[in-house]
Image (tube, rainbow, N blue to C red):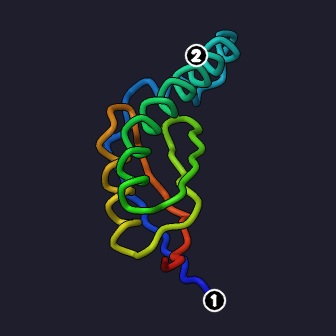
Amino acid sequence: MPKKLILAVLLSLPASLTVVGTVSAAQPLLLAAAQGKDAQLAKDVEGTVKPQAEQLGAQVTLVVKRGQVVLSGVAPSEDAIRQLVELASTVPGVEQVSSEIEVKPV
């Protein structure tokens, strides 16, 4: 049975996140802006993580919601998973990285 390693890297939250969480007439615009930021952030994280994942022999997909990144897929070792989580956490705009990547030795 493959092992599952779950890691979370918490980073400081930008002030804009609290604005998105408030209820006001402008909320739909703020949520749309947050979704647009998430799409760009997903591209940025993918561009950073994908080359390293390929080098490590990992197959990883990601989901971003309000700056929270969830990595999933398979990797050859727990060390490879740690490297990918740490790398994703370095991307500007990432607030938290969680891993649902399973270890599947080559």
Q: Residues within 10 Å of mark 2 (few under 14, many from 20)?
A: few
Q: Are marks 2 and 1 in contact (CB under 8 Å)?
A: no
Residue 1, which numbered label? 1
Looking at the image, is 90 positioned above or below residue 28? below
Left or right side of 98 for 86: left
- Tell me the quarter of the image containing the N terminus: bottom right
Residue 36 at what x, y percent from top left?
Answer: 58, 19
Left or right side of 67 for 14: left
At x 41% / y 76%, what residue is drawn? 77
**Residue at mark 2 to residue at mark 1: CA–CA distance:** 41 Å
Judged from the image, the secondary structure of the residue bearing numbered disc 1 is loop
Left or right side of 25 for 12: left
Please state which of residues 82 and 31 is positioned toward the viewer in this rendering: 82
Of all residues, the one furthest to the bottom in this rendering is 1
Amino acid type of the residue that numbered disc 2 sits on in the rendered structure: Ala
Judged from the image, the secondary structure of the residue bearing numbered disc 2 is helix
Dot in front, 2 or 1: 1
Residue identifier under label 2: 33
At x 42% / y 54%, what residue is drawn? 53
Left or right side of 68 for 28: right
Amino acid type of the residue that numbered disc 1 sits on in the rendered structure: Met
